[in-house]
Amino acid sequence: MTNQEIRNRLDSIDILRGLVIVLMAIDHTRDMWSLTAFTPEDMTQTTAGYFFTRWITHFCAPVFVFLAGTSICLYFQKIQDKKQLTSFLLKRGIWLIAIEIIVINWSWSWTLFWNQWGFFLQVIWVLGVAMIAMAGLIWLSYRNILIISLLMIFGHNLLNFITPDQLGAFDWVWKTLHEGGWISLNGSNSFGIFIAYPLIPWIGVMGAGYVFGLVMSWPEQDRTKMLYRLGFGAIVVFVVLRFLNLYGDTADWEVQKSSLFTLMSFLNTQKYPPSLLFLLMTLGPSFLLLILFEQWQSRKLDFLKIFGRVPFFFYVLHFAVIHIASMIYFRLAHGEWFDLAVNSNAQSWPDYYQPSLIRMYLAWSVIVVLFYFLCKWYDRYKSRHTNWWLKYL
């Protein structure tokens, strides 16, 4: 493999990661700039604009977690030292969990977790725990890692019949592993943890991404063939299982008032926790995008590549920037410091507030351009310095 082929291969990963990071910012901008009283997935109230604005962001978490596993594999191929990799994964995992609890929660609520109702655990927490799990899994063979990962991804919906209340005092275990939801930490149920991202099957997604790192080291022709097989294979399995309403999701699709809304119902798979069909629907097209990004090396894609090279830097900062910007907007436009992220209950919204996708997309565009320059600066800084903390941001 030539140096240019290696560069194209690695660039394709950065470009795809950059794309999902930019898409992710759409969802968080919507939360803080154009929240609606209904969920965008509610077929009885939503519009096509709000549904697909939400739907395109579904690709973010699966691709981000999967490619994190791929990056771990590529890093191991570089250092060839499992002890060093284990140490890195443990430290990185603990660091990510701390960032989730302290920084990300603060960016949403402007309060530290011990002063309010508690804290939530989302994608950064699951990345951290999955990395800690990978610190152990990497000592297994690639074959065994793949088997365990696929069992988690394809088999976890078989466990849907188990509910947390069936485990009594240990309901928190099932919520953490499979179900998600509220875990009270005091007798009055006023302080606790909300788990948005339970661990299964996310650990399996990262494990599958780790094994996929081997594919990304294959010669280009073999790699492209496998990417086509994985991409179209996942899409076909998704379409067949979804069409038959046979297995892999908690809610069946139904014929709606129009063909467009019927399509929306078909695509409306469960994210919390992620169903098998949700993962197939999002990861399948992503394999095909890797082919496109590797073969279409253009300066037009450098914009996305910048975000993909420093995704954690973007993630940690973008919540606070979007949040502050929205409050400034409502102050300038309506003379009031209105905080939509904190006041998410529609009954508390002022009369002047109306959701607007136009406002949301304009704000998102400005924020993405701003972060392009911030990320470009940080990428240059990171490439020229060797500070220990740069490995974790």
Image: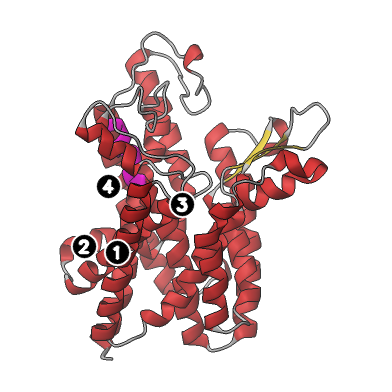
Residue underneath mark 3: 248
**Residue for point 51% across, 66% down:** 206
Q: Read off the magenta span.
A: 49-57
Task: Say what amino acid the circle numbered 4 marks.
Answer: Val
Q: According to the image, label 2 marks what residue?
A: 301
Q: Which residue is mark 1?
A: 15
**Element marked by disc 4:** helix
x and y, in percent, of residue 266 in the image: 32, 42
Q: Is residue 353 above or below residue 381?
A: above
Cα separation, mark 3 vs mark 4, equals 38 Å
Residues packed near mark 3 inside 10 Å, few (<14), some (14 to 19) or many (20 plus) = many
Give above or below for 140 relative to 17: below
**Left or right: where does residue 83 sit relative to residue 292?**
right
Q: Earlier in the sequence, mark 1 or mark 3?
A: 1
Task: Give how far across and how far down residue 255 sits, in percent.
Answer: 29, 33
Query: Which numbered tag is attached to residue 332?
Result: none
Q: Residue 103 magenta-drawn? A: no
Tag in front: 1 or 3: 3
In the picture provided, is 352 more to the left or to the right than 201?
Answer: left
Image location (x, y in percent) of residue 378? 40, 61
SS category of the residue bearing label 2: helix
Residue on which the image places disc 4: 369
